[in-house]
Structures are given as C-alpha cells and as structure tokens.
Amino acid sequence: MKKVKVTFNHETCIGTGTCATLTTKYWQMGDDTKSQLIGGSLNKKTKVYELTTEVDDEDYSILKETQQFCPSQSISVKEIK
Ligand code: SF4
C-alpha cells in the first residue's frame, strides 16, 4: 500500500470527464459539469481540494493516469513517505 496525497483544483477543471471515465472510485462529475474529488476536502488557504489516503498499486496507477491525462493540469497525485 502507498500513502498518497491527491489534490484537485476545481477552479481550473474544464469538465472533460476524463478523470471520472478512468475511475469513479475517486472522481465524479458534479451538477456544475466539473469534476469532484470523492472524499476530498477544500483547503481554504490553497483553494484546492485535498485527499490523503492509502491505495494499492492498481489504484495508484489509475490515479496517476488521471493526473497525466487531465488536460487542464487540475490533478496532482503524490506519494507521501
Ligand atoms: S480530467 Fe481534469 S479537466 Fe477533465 S473533468 Fe477531470 S479534473 Fe476536470
């Protein structure tokens, strides 16, 4: 298992739905046509949503794909030691 921090910038999301197509475990499309980070909470200082969680290798790969394929660079996935 890996401990990861996922961050999501709702402001810059352009609503392509790519992340939610890759996995609905972490991403869902909201009524505002933008994505939502499931279980994420808004950091009022940085204005991005954050989720710290433990994932297996498969989920880690999928999360990294959501980062890689997000066209607006709204997603960051980093392993925490
Ligand atoms: S892939 Fe990026 S731009 Fe597209 S819905 Fe997800 S966060 Fe938004």
Image (tube, helix red, strand yellow):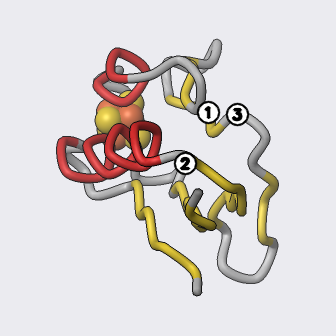
Q: Is the residue indicated by label 3 positioned so its CB lies within 8 Å of ligand 1?
A: no
Residue 6, x across and y down, in percent: 56, 60
Q: What residue type is labelled 1?
A: Gln
Q: Quadrant of residue 62?
A: top left
Is 33 situated left or right of 71 in this image?
right
Query: In front here: 60 or 32?
Result: 60
Residue designated by label 3: 38
Which label's residue is closer to the chain start, 1 or 2?
Answer: 2
Quadrant containing ligand 1: top left
> What's the CA distance linking mark 3 and mark 1?
6 Å
User: In the rendered structure, which amino acid carries the disc numbered 3?
Assistant: Ile
User: Residue at position x 53%, y 46% from top?
Assistant: 56
Mark 2: is the Cβ under 8 angstroms from ligand 1? no
- The mark found on residue 7 in the picture is none
The answer to whether residue 14 is seen in the rendering is: no
Q: Is mark 3 on a helix, strand or loop?
A: loop
Residue at mark 1? 36
* Location of mark 2 (residue): 10
Q: Residues within 10 Å of mark 3 (few under 14, many from 20)?
A: some
3 and 1 marks in contact (CB < 8 Å): yes
Residue drawn at (41%, 63%), measured in percent from left and top? 76
> Could you tell whether 57 is left or right of 65 in the image?
right
Residue 54 lies, with reference to residue 25, above or below; the image says below
Q: State which quadrant residue 48 falls in.
A: bottom right
Is 50 situated above or below 28? Answer: below
Residue count near mark 2 (Cα–Cα under 10 Å), binned few <14, some 14–19, many ≥20: some
